[in-house]
Image (cartoon, rainbow, N blue to C red):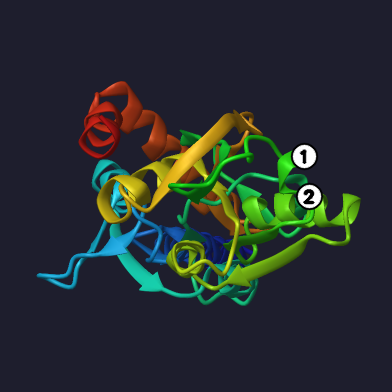
Amino acid sequence: MKKFLSLLLIVMLAIGMLAVAGCGGNEEETAITKLVVGSETAYAPFEMVDENTGDYIGFDMDIIKAIGDAMGVEVEIRSMEFTALIPALQNGQIDCAISAMSITEERAQSVDFSDSYFDAGLIIAVAADTKGIETLDDLKGKVLAAQIGTIGADACVAVQTEDPATEVKTYDHVGEAFMELEKGGADAVVNDLAVTAYYIKTEASDKAKMVGEVFQADDHYGMPVQKGDAATLALLNEGLAKIKADGTYDEIYTKWFE
């Protein structure tokens, strides 16, 4: 009987040690040490390529790198088309994305969003000598340009729905939409305020101008993750809170927008 009890005790101890070892292994497997981050890197000043170094720079790039530093996580940026970001999340090709992406109900059906990290809004841009365009109603019947997959493009389509005579041209990159405006192929570009302001300031100060008031001012950017990925979402939110609390966020904002 004693031998049996001794053997039983040894077996139970062994099972317990295996269980503990197994739990420890799972913790190591699930610990996040690296973030593969998708971004459409042609949307200055949020994400762009440094012509001298080839590095990815911009407000979004600084934000995600700061979050990585705050959380002790390596950050790898993968450049891809804006419309490919959500599919890439769904397929597990990337862990999250940061690409001036507006938090919308439609997108939230496919991905989970981090806390908002930037308050945006839309504005209309026209050629510098254009008159008579100030509001969305003024865009009816006009040729409009926007980046595909953005809320700016959605706004253009909404105008077209009200007036089918309106033509909407969409492009993979917002720079192409502005080029279409500059060469006279479009009457207006509808796009995010910060990006439009930066483009006009740096590329087209004598060719284009912003008109009217900012609309959809309740637009907020978030970082999407795969649906149900609570671990990555928690890391992003904690990191964002940290860089806001220690002043890093404000420094980055000032660098790019003031």
Of 72 and 29, which appears nearest the observer? Answer: 72
The number of discs equals 2
Q: Residue at x 66, y 69 (%)?
A: 169
Which residue type carries mark 1? Answer: Asp
Contact between marks 1 and 2 (CB within 8 A): the answer is yes
Q: Can you identify the residue that label 1 sits on?
A: 137
Within 10 angstroms of label 1, few (less than 14), some, or many (20 or more) residues?
few
Image quarter (top left, top right, bottom left or bottom right) of the N terminus: bottom right
Q: Position of residue 31 (x, y in %)?
A: 41, 58
User: Is 209 located above or below residue 176 in the figure?
Assistant: above
Of 15 and 177, which appears nearest the observer? Answer: 177
The answer to whether residue 178 is seen in the rendering is: yes
Q: Is residue 164 left or right of residue 126?
A: right
Q: Can you identify the residue that label 2 sits on?
A: 140
Determine the image quadrant of residue 203.
Answer: bottom left
Q: Position of residue 52 (x, y in %)?
A: 10, 70
User: Is 247 located above or below residue 3 in the figure?
Assistant: above
Q: Residue at x 57, y 57 (%)?
A: 225
Q: Position of residue 95 (x, y in %)?
A: 49, 64
| Disc 1 secondary structure class | helix
